[in-house]
């Protein structure tokens, strides 16, 4: 199954359902060590627009990058439903 990575700013005007986990990666080291098999850009799912005007369902995991100079923003105007939230942080 495909995992999607938030690698750009995006606003979802509907609900977000993640049937796997939301994975917050907090350091470059954790990102480098993360298995990127079957990882695709969120752009491949929602297109090049910064605003997605509908509900969005991700069948597996959603990966959020939380390090570096330009951290992508994810804004959701509806509800978020997920199985689990995982934080990868080798600094803690």
Image (spheres, rainbow, N blue to C red):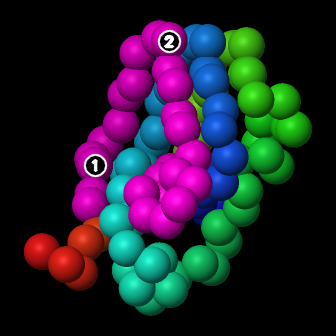
Where 11 sits versus 68, above or below? Answer: above
Residue nearer the viewer, 68 or 90:
68
Residue nearer the viewer, 86 or 38:
86
Residue ID for mark 2: 77
Q: Residue at x 28, y 49 (%)?
A: 85
Q: Residue at x 61, y 21 (%)?
A: 12
Q: Is residue 30 shown to the viewer in this render?
A: yes
Viewer-nearest of discs 1 and 2: 2
Q: Which mark is residue 8?
A: none
Q: Residue at x 27, y 57 (%)?
A: 86
Region in magenta: 60-87
Say whether disc 1 or disc 2 marks the residue closer to the N-terminus: 2
Whether residue 89 appears in magenta in the rendering, the answer is no
Residue nearer the viewer, 57 or 28:
28
Whether residue 73 appears in magenta in the rendering, the answer is yes
Q: Which mark is residue 85?
A: 1
Q: Secondary structure at mark 2?
A: loop
Residue 18 coordinates in the image, percent (x, y): 47, 39
Residue 43 coordinates in the image, percent (x, y): 79, 46
């Amino acid at each position: 199954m495909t995992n999607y990575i938030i690698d750009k700013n995006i606003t979802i005007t509907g609900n977000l359902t993640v049937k796997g986990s939301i994975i917050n990666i907090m350091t470059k080291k954790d990102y480098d060590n993360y298995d990127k098999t079957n990882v695709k850009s969120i752009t491949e799912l929602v297109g090049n627009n910064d605003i997605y005007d509908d509900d969005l369902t991700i069948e597996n995991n959603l990966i959020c990058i939380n390090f570096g100079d330009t951290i992508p923003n994810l804004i959701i105007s509806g509800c978020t439903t997920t199985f689990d939230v995982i934080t990868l942080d080798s600094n803690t």
